[in-house]
């Protein structure tokens, strides 16, 4: 398997941070390029009652905050001497991951998993699960030990 392009979806959780470190290590080993992806999608239909209008300024502030966080992750990767590109989208996370992987020709997706269990998992599913099912390339999921 040849790994030249690694996609790392990041949501700024501890699992995501660990996945980024794993991806940096792999990128160094294979001289690969890392593509960071953050999807700042908010499930408005789930969290907001009908007829609530969210002002554009709110969406703009969410996008700006996301871009600033993504820039910090970009700097983390480049400080390690790894080539990096970043991608920011308002799409749902699993759709954004699969679409971006196809667009950039990803050889590998490295992503964190929160390991939802019970009713939360039944109701919300898992972004990692949907990504594994639909991705155009192998997916490595990374989970930190929770004590």
Image (spheres, grey):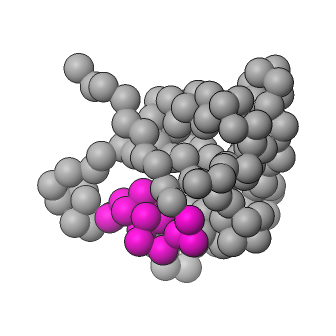
What is the residue that sits farthest to the bottom in this orientation?
Answer: 51
How far across and down, in percent of the image, does residue 45 sit?
A: 48, 74
**Residue 130 lies in the magenta stretch:** yes
> Which quadrant is home to the C terminus?
top left
Rendered view: 89 above or below 68: below
Residue 135 to residue 36: above or below = below
- Locate residue 57 relative to residue 132 in the image: left or right: right
| Image coords of residue 136 (percent x, y) | 57, 72
Instruction: Write the residue at 58% across / 54% down.
Output: 1
The single residue placed furthest to the front in the displayed view is 1
Work out whether residue 68 can be spotted: no
Residue in the image at 56% along x and 65% along y: 137
Place of residue 62 in the rendered image (x, y in percent of width and height, measured from the top left): 71, 50
Q: Magenta region, mostly helix, strand or loop?
A: helix
Foreground of the two, 131 or 41 = 131
The quadrant where residue 57 appears: bottom right
| Magenta segment boundaries in residue numbering | 124-137
Q: Is residue 44 left or right of residue 84?
A: left
Instruction: Report the residue at 51% width, 60% height from top.
Output: 138
Whether 122 is among the magenta residues is no
- Report how many numbered discs are placed on residues in the image: 0
Residue 86 visible in the current orientation: yes
Q: Position of residue 7 (x, y in %)?
A: 66, 52
Q: Where is 128 relative to 84, above or below? A: below
The residue at the point 76 percent across, 55 percent down is 88
Frontmost residue, 55 versus 104? 104
């Amino acid at each position: 398997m040849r790994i030249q392009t690694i996609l790392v979806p990041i949501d700024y959780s501890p699992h995501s941070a660990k996945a980024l470190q794993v991806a940096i290590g792999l990128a160094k080993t294979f001289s690969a390029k890392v593509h960071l992806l953050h999807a700042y999608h908010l499930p408005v239909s789930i969290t907001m009652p009908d007829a609530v209008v969210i002002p554009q300024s709110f969406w703009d502030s969410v996008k700006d905050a996301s871009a600033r966080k993504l820039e910090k992750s970009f700097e983390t990767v480049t400080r390690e001497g790894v080539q990096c590109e970043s991608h920011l989208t308002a799409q749902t996370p699993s759709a954004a991951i699969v679409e971006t992987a196809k667009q950039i020709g990803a050889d590998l997706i490295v992503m964190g998993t929160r390991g939802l269990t019970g009713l939360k998992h039944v109701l919300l599913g898992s972004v990692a699960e949907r990504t594994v099912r639909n991705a155009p390339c192998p997916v490595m999921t990374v989970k930190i030990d929770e004590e």
